[in-house]
Amino acid sequence: MHLKITTWNINSVRLRLDQVGRALDEIGPDILCLQETKCPDNCFPLEGLRAFGYPHIAQVGQKGYNGVAILSRFPFASVDPQAWCERSDARHIAVTLGPEAGKAAGFVVHNFYVPAGGDLPDPEINPKFAHKLQFLDEMRRWGRTREARPAILVGDLNVAPLEHDVWSHKQLLDVVSHTPIEIETLETLREEGGWIDGARRLTPEPTKIYTWWSYRSPNWAIANKGRRLDHAWLSSDLAGTLRSVDVHAATRSWTRPSDHVPVTASLEL
């Protein structure tokens, strides 16, 4: 069985609904995980998304910011939205795939949107950065105690952990998303949770991988000052099933694009 899971920070699902449809048509994933849907629950475009051929949708949203959603060809056995840092800010939802998913039945798919952290990498003066570190630390504790079963963790984790996950390691060490404390925290939670970084398992350093290019750069493709903020991790029992991790950079050139691009992990079960 071939299983494709795509993750994408869409930066407003209603604004880019047509782009979601185009990406689904071109990529053809079995499961699409969206972050930053920026949509309250009562306005979420369920029917529009189902019309693309994904009848099973789990989502939790807020007006104007955050929000995560999972679209699937397969039914869910369960849906579990979870609050973090004692806030109901729609940053995590998990689903367990039902028996109709065949060999993937019982797999848990986690979709995360980690806080960006603001501009100043100092938790003493920047509450947004403090919140980000708290969120990552809670993820670390959660990962150590989660139930041992096949699982996939994807999303905008807002950290580029490795030297070649950014355009300039030296210049970005004091820039939020690539500071040493963020890198250490993310890598610790990944290792302690038994997660495998899919992209780097198949494409190790020093090859550069980016999934985000700032809106502030009008010639983003020429400058190519990107960061790898979007990730696809697998539990260790799925390591042998991973066949590819593809970054769909072409979407960054679409009209009014998200600053993030989709990332697709393909598994052979």
Image (cartoon, rainbow, N blue to C red):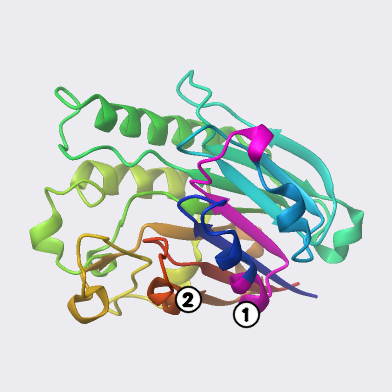
Q: In this rendering, would 93 be left or right of 74?
A: left
Instruction: Tell me the crowding category of disc 1: few under 14, some 14 to 19, or many 20 or more residues within 10 angstroms, Cα based.
Output: few
Point out residue 216 in the picture as x, y percentages from the top left corner: 20, 60
Q: In this rendering, would 194 be left or right of 71?
A: left
Residue, x 50% and y 52% (percent of image)?
155
Point out residue 68 in the picture as x, y percentages from the top left corner: 57, 43
Residue 26 is marked as 1
Which comes sooner in the sequence, label 1 or label 2?
1
Residue 141 is marked as none
Asked if the residues shown at circle 1 and circle 2 are in contact, with their CB atoms under 8 angstroms apart, the answer is yes
Residue, x 43% and y 74% (percent of image)?
254
The verdict on residue 25 being magenta is yes
- Dividing the picture into quadrants, the one containing residue 118 is top left
Residue, x 67% and y 76% (percent of image)?
25
Residue, x 33% and y 42% (percent of image)?
116
Residue 248 is marked as 2
Which amino acid, mark 1?
Glu
The verdict on residue 200 being magenta is no
Point out residue 148 in the picture as x, y percentages from the top left corner: 68, 44
Q: Secondary structure at mark 2?
A: loop
Which amino acid, mark 2?
His
Given residues 106 and 78, the one toward you in this image is 78
Nearer the observer: mark 1 or 2; the answer is 1
Instruction: Tell me the crowding category of disc 2: few under 14, some 14 to 19, or many 20 or more residues within 10 angstroms, Cα based.
Output: some
Q: Secondary structure at mark 1?
A: helix
The range drawn in magenta is: 22-43
Q: In this rendering, would 230 be left or right of 33?
A: left
| Direction right: furthest residue | 100
The C terminus - image quarter: bottom right
The N terminus - image quarter: bottom right
Q: CA distance from mark 1 to mark 2?
A: 10 Å
**In the image, is residue 254 above or below residue 185?**
below
